[in-house]
């Protein structure tokens, strides 16, 4: 019996804990997937009186800013984002912040049909719309003192410069947001969203570093392969000096004067004298001319 009790605790205990914590995180959609909301440029925001919430009066959707996040209500689903045009994350209705739920009906720019019979200066009747189970779990959401409301979070107006083609990709948004916006959120769901974004950023950074390292290694291998495949350089030959490289030595046999001549020194000397006299005589004749 004790063993059965332990097994039941292992099976149902973690499930109960998971149900209490699973909805705290925001389920972000894939970048580029449309949820029916497209904000082309940074919108104008106006503070809801006596609430720490801003709304966008000139947009055609239910668009708010609270606790460092943008909030949108579309198709009976709440979405949140760090940037005004997404990517958007789906927020479970059980963890939507109270101050978002308390915004009066009049500040919804595209109220759904079931809002029509509700008082414009009162919050939507979420308990009536979402049922008793939701009302039980979110008991007290519609009771508060407006004087005890926290100060509104500063608007991330640095995002005005990013619109159209300059709107950053999802992997760039965390770096820009972390650099330009120092606010620390109060709500648990907003804090968890910030952690999620930071956690998503780390794997992308490590992947880029790994790709860069692999490219450097690949480049090194290619260089080594080029070095291995390169033809060997010719080595300098150790041969005769500069004078000998200018041309072959004169060969006596190639000299027309010496063809058919004897190699006797006395005969060569007589022949040289005769040759000099002939040259001298020729010069004298040229001078006489």
Image: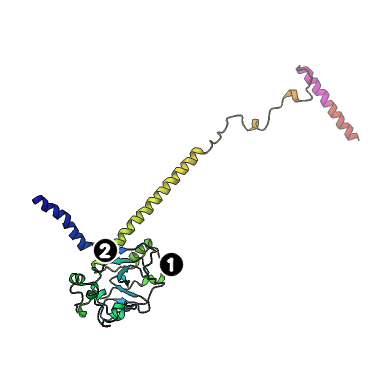
Reading the image, the residue beneath label 2 is 25
Measured from the top left, where is residue 280 in percent x and y?
84, 29
Between residue 118 and residue 273, name the one nearer to us.
Answer: 118
* Residue 106 is inside the magenta segment: no
Vertical relation: 175 (above or below) 286: below
Measured from the top left, where is residue 248 in percent x and y?
68, 29
Which label's residue is closer to the chain start, 2 or 1? 2
Quadrant in the picture for residue 173 = bottom left
Tell me if 148 is positioned left or right of 107 in this view: left
Between residue 206 and residue 74, name the one nearer to us.
Answer: 74
Q: Residues within 10 Å of mark 2 (few under 14, many from 20)?
A: many
Tell me if 33 is positioned left or right of 226 in this view: left
Q: Secondary structure at mark 1?
A: helix
In space, the residues marked 2 and 1 are separated at their CA atoms by 29 Å
Between residue 160 and residue 98, name the one nearer to us.
Answer: 98
* Residue displayed at 43% across by 45% down: 218
Q: Magenta residues?
A: 262-276
Main secondary structure found in the magenta portion: helix
* Residue 271 is inside the magenta segment: yes
Q: Residues within 10 Å of mark 1 (few under 14, many from 20)?
A: few
As drawn, the residue found furthest toward the right would be 289
Q: Secondary structure at mark 2?
A: loop
Quadrant in the picture for residue 144 = bottom left
């Amino acid at each position: 019996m004790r063993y059965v009790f332990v097994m039941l605790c292992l099976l149902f205990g973690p499930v109960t804990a998971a149900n209490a914590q699973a909805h705290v995180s925001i389920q972000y959609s894939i970048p580029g997937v449309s949820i029916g909301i497209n904000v082309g440029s940074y919108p104008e925001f106006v503070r809801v009186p006596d609430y720490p919430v801003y709304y966008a009066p000139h947009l055609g959707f239910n668009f708010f800013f609270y606790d460092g996040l943008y909030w949108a209500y579309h198709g009976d689903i709440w979405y949140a984002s760090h940037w005004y045009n997404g990517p958007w994350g789906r927020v479970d209705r059980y963890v939507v912040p109270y101050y978002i739920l308390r915004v009066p009906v009049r500040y919804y720019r595209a109220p759904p049909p079931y809002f029509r019979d509700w008082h414009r200066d009162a919050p939507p009747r979420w308990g009536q719309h979402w049922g008793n189970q939701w009302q039980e779990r979110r008991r007290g959401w519609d009771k508060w003192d407006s004087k005890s409301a926290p100060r509104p979070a500063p608007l991330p107006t640095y995002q005005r410069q990013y619109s159209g083609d300059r709107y950053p990709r999802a992997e760039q948004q965390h770096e820009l947001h972390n650099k330009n916006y120092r606010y620390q959120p109060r709500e648990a769901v907003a804090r968890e969203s910030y952690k999620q974004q930071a956690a998503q950023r780390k794997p992308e950074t490590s992947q880029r570093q790994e790709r860069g390292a692999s490219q450097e290694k690949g480049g090194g291998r290619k260089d080594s392969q080029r070095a291995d495949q390169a033809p060997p350089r010719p080595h300098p030959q150790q041969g005769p000096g500069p004078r000998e490289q200018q041309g072959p030595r004169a060969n006596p046999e190639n000299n027309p004067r010496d063809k058919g001549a004897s190699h006797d020194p006395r005969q060569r000397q007589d022949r040289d004298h005769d040759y000099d006299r002939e040259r001298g005589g020729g010069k004298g004749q040229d001078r006489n001319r």
